[in-house]
Image (spheres, grey):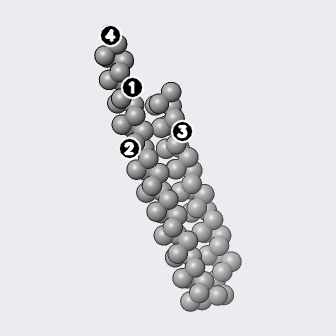
Amino acid sequence: MENEILQDKSMAYIAAGVCAIGMTVAAWGLTKLWTSMIETVGRNPQVKKDVSLFGFVGMGSIESIALYILVIAILMIS
């Protein structure tokens, strides 16, 4: 019985590690978004307002995905 509990908990930790990969991908996506925003405004400063609006909407959606992944990982461990 004790061995089964240990296996279930170890699988939860492995699944949380997989969730950490998802959070890493979300962080990479935020980095790509920021660099694209900076390059776009650097090339054409007149579109700063439009780029900022869509950039912040994109950042919000990427961040929400990362937070959902974090919540799922915490729920699996506890």
> Which residue is labeled 4 in the image?
1
Amino acid of disc 3: Val
Count residues near mark 4 (Cα–Cα under 10 Å), then give few for <14, some for 14-19, many for 20+.
few
Residue position marked by numbered label 1 in the rendering: 9
Q: Secondary structure at mark 4?
A: loop
**Disc 2 secondary structure class:** helix
Q: Residue at x 58, y 79 (%)?
A: 38
Q: Amino acid at mark 4?
A: Met
Q: CA distance from mark 3 to mark 4?
A: 28 Å
Q: Quadrant of residue 39?
A: bottom right
Residues 60 and 72: in front is 72
Residue named by callout 3: 71
Left/right placement of residue 77 relative to residue 2 reads right
Residue picked out by circle 2:
18
- Write the residue at 61% across / 76% down: 51
Marks 1 and 2 close (CB-CB < 8 Å): no
Upstream in the sequence, badge 3 or badge 4?
4
The location of residue 16, given as percent across then percent down, is 42, 38
* Among numbered discs 1 and 4, the one appearing first in the sequence: 4
Residue at image point 31% right, 17% down: 4
The x and y percentages for residue 24 are 45, 55
Sequence-earlier tag: 1 or 2: 1
Mark nearer the N terminus (3 vs 1): 1
Q: CA distance from mark 3 to mark 1?
A: 17 Å
Disc with the residue nearer the chain's start (4 vs 2): 4
